[in-house]
Amino acid sequence: MKTNKILVGIAALSMIFSTSMVVHAEEIDNHESTSDIGFTTPTEGALTLVNVADFDFGSNPISAKDEVYTNKTETMTTVQDIRGTETGWTVQVAQNGQFKADKKELMSAQITLKTPTISDQSTGSATAKTEITLNTDGSSATILEAAAGLGNGVTIENFAKDAATLSVPGETVKVAKQYETSLTWTLLDQPANK
């Protein structure tokens, strides 16, 4: 029994002394070290169009009235900027001629990119231009722009259903076929207004 009391007493004293040693520990010396990492611009794919939007205005009954058709599916244009320069960029789009079915043109038809938005999934920041009507002469229009200091990472421009329209006059003669045109999307390595 005495042995147990002695052991308990020794354990208690050990705890007291160890606690007081921690409390009264003095700092003798300290030094600072550094940790660093560097990055360089990739040699390939630093600034690129990952994908571009396609617009499907559906299959519609021929009409003798002025009609406005909307894109039927969601689509997107994605820019990746991992240059690390923060110099900004611009996306322009051009329509390569009028809609055609064989050689028949859909006269006076106009595409308008009305309400694109920047996706919440974007890590980059840019301005989506709205109410952009494309010309059929191949001239380019700015549709997306990242000012200097913005646009780093991945920027996704969303075109929800109805975000793009195709207006077709009633007086335009139409044939019962599929009409097509193509769009050229161009990525420039600086803001358009620079």
Image (cartoon, helix red, strand yellow):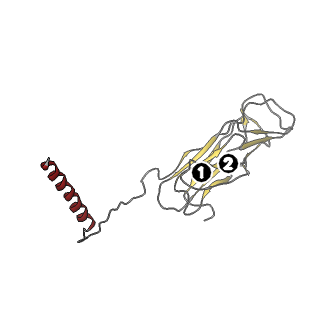
Determine whether label 2 and label 1 are within 8 Å by CB.
Answer: no
Q: Would you place residue 147 above or below residue 44 in this image?
A: below
Return the x and y of residue 183 as percentages of the image width and height.
Answer: 65, 44
Residue placed under numbered mark 2 in the picture: 116
**Quarter-of-image position of residue 97:** top right
Task: State the residue lying farthest toward the top.
Answer: 176
Work out whether residue 53 can be spotted: no
Distance in Å between CA atoms under marks 2 and 1:
17 Å
Whether residue 180 sits left or right of residue 167 in the image: it is left
User: SS at mark 2?
Assistant: loop
User: SS at mark 1?
Assistant: strand
Which amino acid, by three-letter code, is at mark 1? Thr
Which amino acid, by three-letter code, is at mark 2? Pro
Q: Residue at x 71, y 38 (%)?
A: 71
Q: Would you place residue 101 above or below residue 98 in this image?
A: above
Q: Nearer the viewer, mark 2 or mark 1?
A: 2
Q: Residue at x 27, y 69 (%)?
A: 31
Q: Which mark is residue 68?
A: none
Return the x and y of residue 164 as percentages of the image width and height.
Answer: 71, 43
Return the x and y of residue 140 as percentages of the image width and height.
Answer: 66, 53
- The answer to which of marks 2 and 1 sits earlier in the sequence is 2
Which quarter of the rendered picture does the C terminus lie within?
bottom right
Residue placed under numbered mark 1 in the picture: 186
